[in-house]
Amino acid sequence: MFRVLELRDGRVVLSECSERVAPPPPALLRWVDLISPVAMELELLRERFDFHPLTIEDCGHLDQRPKLEEYRDHLFLVTQGFSCKGDKVDELELQELHAFLGERYLVTVHETPIAALEKTWQRLSSEPKLFERGVDFAYYLVADGIVDDNFPILDRIADELEELEDSVLSSPRRKDLQRIFELKHHLVSMRKVLSPQRDVLGLLTKRGDARVSERTAVYLRDVYDHLVRINESIESSRDLLGNALEAYLSAVGQRTNEIMKYLTIMSAVFLPLAFVVGFFGQNFENLPFIEDWTHSDRLMWGMVVMCVAVPVVMLTWFKRKNWL
């Protein structure tokens, strides 16, 4: 579905007709937005704006890397970001925006609604002065919103990392290990997208293109700084996840060692007891120097005393050695 936003004589005009899907006449600024594109609509864009077929093909497959391509009368930009529903980062939704930036027009193509784009659309509709700064400034507002939407996601990940560290250090659980790998997967996905996105914004601000004014380039450099901060935050979060994973493995290993220690102590305590009861359980009627030993009360009580005294003595010794 097409929708068009125009700046005409200081007023913003909105429409949803395909007749205005074309380069604007002189002294006019036009933003054409296409949601959920189909082949016929993309072909209309190619015919009206004379876009390169490769860019139209990219718009039909919304799984591109962030990039910047220069053509005769426009720039083709792929901008990506992430959104997340809920308080916890359970599933990241990739937002991909394809933009054609000319001197007096901006064409955006996206598969699903993008919150930052909708916010910018509403803002320009009510504030014509912003649109007077040019279509490059409109693209800046959209790109800035898409980039800034990543900060809340990273903040949620950082907060959850603190909770995971506390949980791992106090009582490590198997679900903590599973969550660590889930967050690591999310961070890897974000880095794969936002790292090249940073390079694209850096290239856009440094190349001095005529379709991007120097005043807008200053704002785009701010977006580039935000992407640098985001990538640094991703790297630091990945380091913290690695530390949490090491802490989990160390805690589990220490817990296993404690269990093995107690099992070893129990084995050590029962070893002499097994010898005592084994000795007195022999199937001999007579023993040297002991007459009628199988009916001796003194031997019986001696065996009972040994079975009680040996564990007490051994446990006392272990305690003095700080083995318990």
Image (cartoon, rainbow, N blue to C red):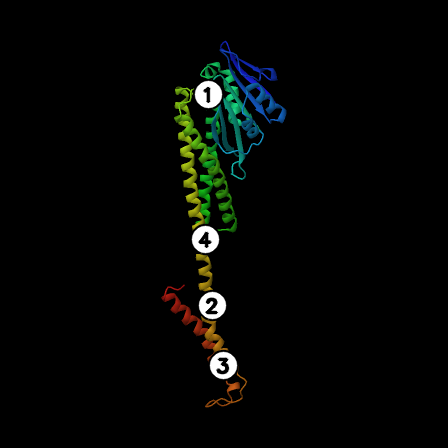
Q: Which residue is mark 3?
A: 279
Q: Which of disc 1 and disc 4 is earlier in sequence?
A: 1
Residue type at numbered disc 2: Met
What's the CA distance linking mark 1 and mark 2?
76 Å
What's the CA distance linking mark 4 and mark 1?
51 Å
Q: Which of disc 3 and disc 4 is earlier in sequence?
A: 4
The residue tagged with tag 1: helix, strand or loop?
helix
Residue neighbourhood size for the residue with mark 1, other residues' Cα within 10 Å, grouped as few (<14), some (14–19), many (≥20): many
Task: Give the residue drawn at x 54%, y 28%.
Answer: 54
Residue neighbourhood size for the residue with mark 3, other residues' Cα within 10 Å, grouped as few (<14), some (14–19), many (≥20): few
What's the CA distance linking mark 3 and mark 2?
20 Å
Residue neighbourhood size for the residue with mark 2, other residues' Cα within 10 Å, grouped as few (<14), some (14–19), many (≥20): few
Q: Which residue is mark 1?
A: 136
Q: Position of residue 28 (x, y in %)?
A: 50, 12
**Is residue 201 or residue 47 the one in the foreground?**
47
**Does 154 sit above or below residue 177?**
above
The residue tagged with tag 2: helix, strand or loop?
helix
